[in-house]
């Protein structure tokens, strides 16, 4: 739905130049919620602004719904007609809402439709419908100055949806909101994504946002995407920085030196299985649970558990194989040669991504 | 001089002042507003960024603002004759009045429009709006209270200038003050005229403030106020 190819953006001011984007390839599939995280100055805002050409990329292409926007005339300050029409099919919500204080909530939502040239009657109807959708039907006649932050952002979202876009861009839409309001706005985005099949590209610096609404994520650093993929794939990859951020390994116990310590990650369907008791029953071995955590990430249940099996790695090859057959991702933390750090995993784990 | 003598003279002069100021205001609004908006749009960071245009317009406005009005009155005589066909009377005075007020108002418009959040401009762009949509849907409506306030200041300045224009044959209250109050030593009449001018300015200011308050009644403060009142 949104594809960027080798996107670069260099800002020049005098003889200084800043490379804000450095060869970004992003692929957002239709109907997914895609989150981009990264530290301040990583280029996240620049990236999302390049998607609707509020910022002209220095090189590379941006394709939205099959249309190459980089080929359309205009610059960031003044867009040609075709680009303006393309933008009408891309909704955008902003960190500071950017609502017109001189207009009522309803008039704010009608604004994009006025620009499109829709007649008054149709505008009214559409705005009422959208306000209903975001749960603000009773605020239609209020002014933005009379609303809370969360309500303002709902108006912002309703306005962004006025042109029936297939794509919604969101730059830190919840960063000005408190945690409770953030959750409700994110839930709204998720609902819209599911009800309307809306593709959402969102920028955030909060891992929680990714965790609660995204299907896929990308990590940016220094103008580059250093990691990207679906959350499922990322979590299955033990080298993934994002996965580690999403699901931090807490200070679990490390077990006795003569045992075998396993880290088991389970997602979705597999989380319902009572694999610990099955393991103990089937193989007649003692399973000592060192720690466990379960979280819902992107609407899927993900759990991680550290267990210790009695006996060496060699003794436990069969039970480990059994667990992998159940669709679990199993990392062996201490091989036959004793305890290793959680990040220097032994050879067996390299292949388990395919199994999980 | 009795009140009965003064009254008809005052009435005619007041009408002339109103006409002078009214027409000058209209022309100022018509030309000063676009000029002020143009200054913002062509500035760097504006949607029509254009350095040469911005510099030239800015320079003209600056020169216009720094010229003393009396100089303008005299310097514009040929232009005035060309526009209205005469160089005396209130009709002639409207020309230098408007010419003097346009740059003044344009600068005020510029700063009013500059006060509009850039995020709104970006929002209009993101929803596919043109530069014209930016001006019409965001810049002007959002700056409206500040623009009305700018207009009030301009009208008051025009009332003052119109009195000055009156002293050099421009008609209106200023002319009356010179011809009767000063040259014929009618001190009482002079006082009456001065009081009328003061009242005129006060009324304009009051109306302007009222309009500004009404227009900004939709912002945060109004919301807060009405909520407090309800509580
Ligand atoms: N208009 C500009 N002119 C010059 N440099 C810019 C401009 N906009 C952004 N930059 C630079 O580009 C880099 C990326 O900025 P960007 O705003 O995309 O970061 P970000 O990831 O959104 O950060 P944050 O989380 O703080 O919003 C920064 O180094 C910034 O200083
Ligand atoms: Mg940013």
Image (cartoon, grey):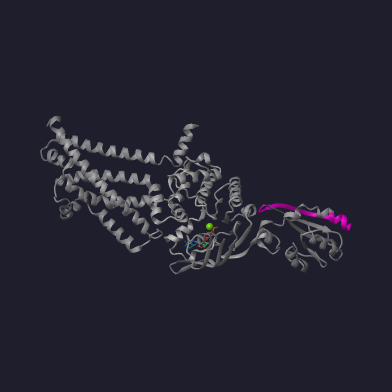
Quadrant location, the C terminus of chain A: bottom right
- The residue segment tinted magenta is A278-299
Residue B160 shown left or right of residue A165 in the figure: left
Residue A291 shown left or right of residue A60 in the figure: right
- Residue A310: say if magenta: no
Q: Position of residue B140 (x, y in %)?
A: 38, 49
Nearest to the observer: residue B226 or residue B196: B226
Q: Quadrant of residue A323?
A: bottom right
Residue B64 shown left or right of residue A305 in the figure: left
Residue B219 shown left or right of residue B2 in the figure: right
Q: Quadrant of residue B179?
A: top left
Quadrant location, the N terminus of chain A: bottom right
- Residue A280: say if magenta: yes
Q: Position of residue A322 (x, y in %)?
A: 82, 61
Q: Position of residue A272 (x, y in %)?
A: 77, 52
Q: Position of residue A181 (x, y in %)?
A: 58, 45
Nearest to the observer: residue A206 or residue A110: A110
Nearest to the observer: residue B117 or residue A249: B117
At 17% from the left and 36% from the top, the residue drawn is: B10
Q: Quadrant of residue B89?
A: top left
Nearest to the observer: residue A284 or residue B180: A284
């Amino acid at each position: 739905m949104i594809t960027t190819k080798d996107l670069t953006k260099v800002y020049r001011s005098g003889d200084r130049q800043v490379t804000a984007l450095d060869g970004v390839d992003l692929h957002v599939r239709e109907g997914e919620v895609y989150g981009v995280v990264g530290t301040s100055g990583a280029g996240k805002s620049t990236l999302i602004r390049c998607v609707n050409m509020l910022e002209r990329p220095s090189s590379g292409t941006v394709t939205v719904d099959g249309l190459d926007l980089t080929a359309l005339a205009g610059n960031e300050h003044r867009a040609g007609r075709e680009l303006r029409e393309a933008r009408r099919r891309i909704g955008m919500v902003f960190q500071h809402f950017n609502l017109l204080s001189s207009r009522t909530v309803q008039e704010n939502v009608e604004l994009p439709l006025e620009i499109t040239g829709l007649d008054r009657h149709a505008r009214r109807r559409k705005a009422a419908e959208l306000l209903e959708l975001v749960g603000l039907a009773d605020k239609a006649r209020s002014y933005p100055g009379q609303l809370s932050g969360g309500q303002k952002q709902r108006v912002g979202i309703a306005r962004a949806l006025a042109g029936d876009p297939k794509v919604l861009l969101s730059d830190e839409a919840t960063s000005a909101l408190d945690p409770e309001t953030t959750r409700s706005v994110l839930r709204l985005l998720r609902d819209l994504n599911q009800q309307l099949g809306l593709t959402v590209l969102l920028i955030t610096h909060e891992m929680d946002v990714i965790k609660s609404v995204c299907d896929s994520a990308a990590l940016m650093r220094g103008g580059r995407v250093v990691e990207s993929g679906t959350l499922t794939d990322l979590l299955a990859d033990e080298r993934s920085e994002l996965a580690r951020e999403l699901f931090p390994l807490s200070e679990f116990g490390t077990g006795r030196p003569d045992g075998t310590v396993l880290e088991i990650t389970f997602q979705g369907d597999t989380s319902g299985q009572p694999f610990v008791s099955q393991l103990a029953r089937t193989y007649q071995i003692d399973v000592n649970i060192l720690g466990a955590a379960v979280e819902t990430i992107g609407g899927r249940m993900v759990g991680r558990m550290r267990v210790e099996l009695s006996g060496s790695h060699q003794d436990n090859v069969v039970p480990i194989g059994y667990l992998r057959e159940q669709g679990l991702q199993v990392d062996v933390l201490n091989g036959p040669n004793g305890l290793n750090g959680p990040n220097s995993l032994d050879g067996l784990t390299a292949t388990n991504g395919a199994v999980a | 001089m009795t009140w009965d003598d003064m009254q008809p003279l005052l009435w005619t002069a007041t009408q002339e002042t109103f006409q002078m100021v009214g027409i000058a205001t209209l022309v100022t609004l018509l030309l000063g507003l676009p000029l002020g908006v143009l200054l913002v749009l062509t500035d760097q960071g504006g949607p029509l960024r254009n350095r040469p245009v911005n510099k030239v317009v800015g320079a003209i406005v600056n020169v216009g603002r720094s010229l003393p009005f009396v100089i303008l009155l005299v310097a514009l005589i040929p232009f005035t004759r060309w526009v209205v066909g005469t160089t005396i009377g209130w009709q002639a005075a409207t020309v230098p009045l408007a010419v003097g007020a346009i740059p003044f108002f344009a600068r005020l418009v510029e700063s009013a429009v500059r006060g509009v959040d850039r995020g709104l401009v970006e929002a209009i762009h993101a929803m596919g709006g043109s530069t014209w949509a930016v001006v019409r849907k965001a810049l002007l409506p959002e700056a409206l209270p500040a623009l009305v306030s700018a207009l009030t200041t301009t009208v008051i300045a025009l009332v003052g200038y119109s009195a000055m224009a009156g002293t050099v044959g421009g008609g209106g209250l200023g002319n009356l003050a010179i011809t009767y109050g000063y040259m014929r030593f009618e001190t009482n009449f002079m006082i009456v005229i001065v009081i009328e001018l003061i009242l005129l300015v006060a009324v304009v200011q009051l109306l302007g403030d009222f309009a500004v308050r009404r227009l900004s009644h939709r912002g945060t403060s109004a919301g807060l106020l009405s909520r407090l009142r309800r509580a």
